[in-house]
Structures are given as structure tokens and as C-alpha cells.
Amino acid sequence: MDRGSVFRRCGCRDQATGRLLGSGCPRLSSRRHGTWYFSIELPSSAGDRRRVRRGGFASRSAAVAALEAVSGTAPGPAQGLRVEEWLERWLASRVSLRASTSRGYAAHVRGYLVPYLGGIPLAELAPGDVQGMFTAIIRGEVALGRPVSPATLRRIHATLRAALNAAVRAGLIAVNPGRWPELPAAARPRPQVWTPAMTELWQREGRRPAVGVWTAEQTAQFLGHVRSHRLYALLHLVALRGLRRGEAAGLRWADLDLDAATLTVTGQLQQLGGRLVTGAPKSEAGRRVVALDRTTIAALRAHQVRQQAERAAAGAGWAKSGYVFTTPVGRPVAPDGLTRLFRRLVAESGLPPVTLHGLRHGAATLALAAGTDLKIVADQLGHSTITLTADTYTSVLPHTARAAADTTAALLFPAHPRQVRTRRPGLRPGRRPVPARAWHRRSQHKRRALDGTGRTGRERQPVIVYLAMPPARPCGLERDAWRLG
């Protein structure tokens, strides 16, 4: 039976080749250099065995305790087990997490949970201790000028709740004391389009939304600015098809079918402790096939030609990684490096600031503004439900919002059709028509004047309804003549 091993490693690399030095680093002779790791081979559910390797422990004893927790040889829970010891043991036992999730758990444990709760015996941990920790975090970070967002507080709480739930299942405590702390409400930040008014406010006062999204014109301006960059195809792909940062960095040529105009997302590239790790997509819905438009296909073909030229120039130094987007020597690009590159390119363009993930938000907003069905947009982004898509992308482009407002108003207040009046023969322009009753009286006076009989004329109804009247009221003899016809 493999009992595992414990060793010390660092992240130093050879300056010539860029490879990790590993156990050959000369600085490992110093106790302060590097961190402790453990490695063990464990059976898997498929019947074979797999190697489990975890690191980042501050001391050898902590690595040994984690190894014992994973291998199942750790002694039974002692009465004086502290929160810090349990958190380290729980963290080391989580072997099926994605790299980013494991990194987030470790950051919460070592940055917040251990400093505030680590010295308390696990059996004596109370809800008041948990509430006091969050109160101290909020006040302390505000005093340092770096307030913690409500979303970060809830992620810290999720880590603590998961660790204490594991302690309940292990029989170490009866109930979870970290279930119901009072935390600030965390609202999901919604993308906001950089309208001219918001852009002017940013230029004048530096104010910016939590998640900014470019308009179609601004996105086109940015793509025109970076067209000559060697990673233009990556930025074009994120801006139009909405790939995540790790998905774009982890894209391989085997995942592309340019003739069929499709792209298959099968994984993502993540950074963990200075290392690049290949992992599964963010969710099961992240495994998807994305349709490509003709401009994206043209950008990818041009990028392929450029990469072949770089490969020929690198010669034997080219790394056959198979990735679409690489360094000039064929190595995969780091997601954090893409973030820094994008930030620099946005600053050079002079456009309002957005993040690389905001460029993905912009692709979704543009698709919805173009009238794309919500289900299609959700599939394109890799969302599990359209509810997430609808809740996140409630913003639309200004001209689309105006068109929707006009369409809604037209249902209640339709534009009145222009009435076209046909002028009766003999009715000169500028003369106003006379009501039918007035014409009836005047026709009686006219008949009496013509035949002198004094008949009322009721037996005959007038046929002509309109009569031209002069523009001004006559007076004197002219009025008498007008009455007589």
C-alpha cells in the first residue's frame, strides 16, 4: 500500500528554458524558501489508481496531517481539535475540486478563516464567533481602505459552511454554527452599456459602472485598433462569440472545424500557484458547440497562417502544444496574462474601460439587441438555464431601447392617418363649408325670391350639402346681396 510522501517545492523556473526547477532549486536549502507538498496514490471509482498531489502547506507537519487525512490513516478526532487543524485537514481532503475552486477555498481559509477562528477549539465554536469574524472583516478592511464586497463575504461564508458541514458529517460537532450569520445583501452586478452620458461622466469624474459594456460602435472601434496584434483573433472571438477567458486560452486546433463553421468547447485553461492547469468547463452546460460567423472564421484562418510563420521562425524551440493561441514559441498563453494584455490595449485605445469578461458580456448584449432568441444566446454562452441569461443581461443598447419604447407606445397611441379631403366642384380653396342646416334655411330664402310663392320647401330636401362662403363677413348692401344669392 502506498503511504505517500512529503516534500518541499518552489515555483522557481530556469531562466533559459522556463521549466520549473523542482527539487533542483538551490534555494531549497533555506527553510524559508518554498512550501510543503504531499503525494499519494489512491484507488479511484473506476478500479484503477490515481496520483493525488497537494501543496502550499507552511510546515511539514501540516503536510503530514493532510496526507493522513487523505489516506485515511489519521488518528481519531481529539477533544482539543482546533478550527485551524480541521480546516487544513478538510482542505487537503477535497481532491475532486476544480483548480480555481480549490484555490478560492485555500485563499479564504488562510486569508480570513484561520486568522480569525483558527485558535478556537472546533467543539466550542459558536455562532457568535462566526458573526464576530465577519464584523471584524468588514470593519478591518474598510479601515485599511479596501472594503470587502458583499459577494466576497458570501463566498467566504460558503467556504466556512462547507467545512463545518463536513465536520458535522464526521461526527466532530453536532450542528453547524456558521449557518446563519447576518451578511450585507449581495446584488448581482448587471452589465451597463457605455452610453454617451455615462462616457462623459467617466471622463469628467472618473465614475464607472461595476460591469461596463461597449456599444457596437465602440466594440468595432476597439477591434479596429487591435487588428494588427498577434492575438487579434482571440479578442475577436471573445467579442463576437462570448467565450470565457479560460475557454479561449484552452482552445485547441482539434476543437475547431472552420469548414463547418463550428467551435467545440471541451475544457479551459486555469492558473494555479503559477502553474497552468487544464480543467473541465465551468459547468456541464459549458460543454457546447458554438457557431462561427464568416468574420470570425476569416480572423482564425489569418491567425493560423501567422502561427505557422512563428513556428517556422522558432524551429526546434517550438513547443507542440496544439493550442490555438500561444506565445511566439508555441506555449499556451496564461489567462492572467490575457487580462493584463487586454487592460493595456483598452487604455491605449482611449475607450471607456471594460474587463475581458465584460467583452463577453458585450457579445451577449449585442446578440440580444440583434434579436437573437434568448435560448440561443444562453447556449452560446454556456448557461445552464435561460433564467441566468435573462437575469444577467437585462441591459440593451440605447437604440434598441428606444425602438422598443416606440413600438410599445404605438400600441396605445397609433399615428392618426392623414385625412385627405376631396374638394367639391366649384368650392374654391380658402372657403370653408357651410353646415347642412344653414344651407337648408338659405335655400328656402332663395326659392322664395325666385318664384314668390312663399312655399316652405319642406317637400323637397336639399341635395347639395356644402356651400362656399366668403373668407370675410360682408356688411351693408353686400350682405343683403349675399343673402339673396
Image (cartoon, rainbow, N blue to C red):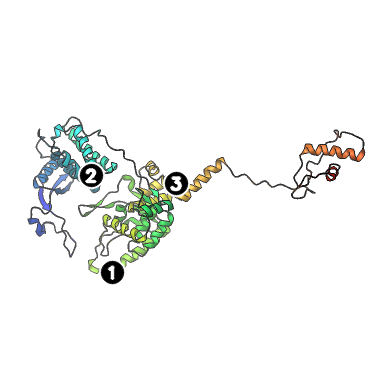
Question: Which residue carries the number 3 mark?
Answer: 373
Nearer the observer, 344 or 97: 344
The answer to whether the residue labelled 1 contacts the one labelled 3, judged by CB atoms less than 8 Å apart, is no
As drawn, 459 above or below 239: above
Q: Amino acid at mark 3?
A: Asp
Residue 257 coordinates in the image, percent (x, y): 36, 57
Question: Which residue carries the number 2 mark?
Answer: 143
Cα–Cα gap, marks 1 and 3: 44 Å
The answer to whether the residue labelled 1 contacts the one labelled 2, judged by CB atoms less than 8 Å apart, is no
Closer to the camera: disc 1 or disc 3? 3
Quarter of the image with the N terminus in it: top left
The answer to whether the residue labelled 3 contacts the one labelled 2, judged by CB atoms less than 8 Å apart, is no
Closer to the camera: disc 3 or disc 2? 2
Q: Residue at x 34, y 41 (%)?
A: 187
Residue 354 coordinates in the image, percent (x, y): 35, 53
Cα–Cα gap, marks 1 and 2: 55 Å
- Drawn side of residue 285 relative to residue 34, left or right: right
Q: Amino acid at mark 2?
A: Ala
Judge whether residue 431 can be spotted in this image: yes
Label whose residue precedes the other's in the sequence (1 or 2) = 2
